[in-house]
Image (tube, helix red, strand yellow):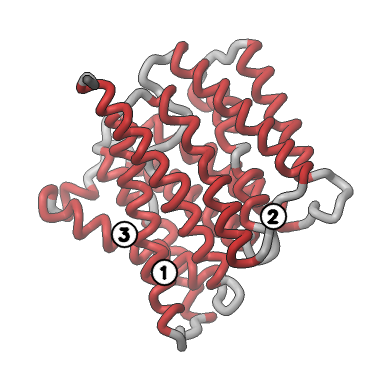
Amino acid sequence: MWKATDQNTARGIFLMCLTSVLSFPLLNTTVKYLVTDFSVWQIVWARALFHLGFMLLLFAPRMGIVGLFRTAHPVLQGLRSLLQFLAMLFYFSALEEIALPTATAIAFTAPLMVVAFSVPILGEKVGPRRWGAVIFGFLGALIIIRPGADVTDWATLYVLGSALCYAIYQILTRRVAARDDARTTAVYTVVAALIGASIVAPFDLVAPTLTTQWLAFAGLGLTGALGHLFLIKAYASAEASIISPFDYGQLIGATILGYLIWNDFPDLWTWIGAFILVLSGVYIARREAVRRPGASIRDTAK
């Protein structure tokens, strides 16, 4: 018979798989579908609007609007929200040109960047084994990108820029986590995106004409918000060192959807690079758990 901890671990793994294999790949697939007919600014605006609306409906009745936005770190919350905005803008722009599985694989450099930037920003100490894993992981990224090959273009640089913004965003999330409620942090995550996109999007706004397009716009916020909630519940149910590796299931979901919809399938070198990246990320997650029990290099407010 399973113990309660075994049941919680199984629940955590299941929720993480829902997030990684289903929610976030569906979100990115929806973006790639919409970006052919609508501007990135409009997509970011819709993503932020529906996400924030869902969060307010879920949390405001219990916390109140004022309580939900009360923060001990207004500057840091604003900065991390801005970084998440830039991360979305870069990544969504890249999906216009780059295959979904390839973009997903390159985005896995973010956990490696978290380790690198945790030294100057958080003052953490990183040992030689974790530095070795970071370097090994970036070699995997280079194999995917292959500088000088046809796959190296502005879209690849956008994905790397998105990973950089997201990595610093995760580090700042660690800074605010000690004093701010997780629900407050979740709401602030898309505030900058909503404000920024609301300024630009009206100048390039195109009304959806198909029912599928309306559903896709609504689905942006729903899949993102559900993925976020699944992620929070997953980390609340099991140790991060156990469930973090399942986050790389995004590559499975992205590959399946990319192949079924656009006939995109990663080549051999992309698979080799992705394997190296995943191996490095899993090792760092394990080392993080040993160094700081219960900690995770992955953010719970994606």
Name which residue type carries label 3: Leu
Along the horizontal axis of the image, is 156 left or right of 48? Answer: right
Residue 46, labelled with which disc? Answer: 1
Marks 1 and 2 in Cβ contact (< 8 Å):
no
Q: Secondary structure at mark 1?
A: helix
Mark 1 surroundings: few (<14), some (14-19) or many (≥20) residues within 10 A:
many
Disc 3 to disc 2, C-alpha distance? 34 Å
Name which of mark 1 and mark 3 comes first in the sequence. Answer: 1
Q: Secondary structure at mark 2?
A: loop
Mark 2 surroundings: few (<14), some (14-19) or many (≥20) residues within 10 A:
some
| Image spot of residue 112 (x, y percent) | 60, 30
Name which residue type carries label 1: Ala
**Front residue of 288 and 70:** 288
**Front residue of 162 and 216:** 216
Q: Which residue is at 45% across, 84% downward?
A: 208
Residue located beneath label 2 in the image: 265
| Image spot of residue 54 (x, y percent) | 27, 60
Residue located beneath label 3 in the image: 52
Name which of mark 1 and mark 2 comes first in the sequence. Answer: 1
Q: Secondary structure at mark 3?
A: helix
Name which of mark 3 and mark 2 comes first in the sequence. Answer: 3
Along the horizontal axis of the image, is 251 left or right of 141? Answer: left
Q: Which residue is at 59% across, 55% downward?
A: 91
Q: Which residue is at 43% across, 71% downward?
A: 216
Marks 3 and 2 in Cβ contact (< 8 Å):
no
The correct choice, above or below, for 38 with respect to 66 in the image is: below
Along the horizontal axis of the image, is 138 left or right of 230? Answer: right
Name which residue type carries label 2: Phe
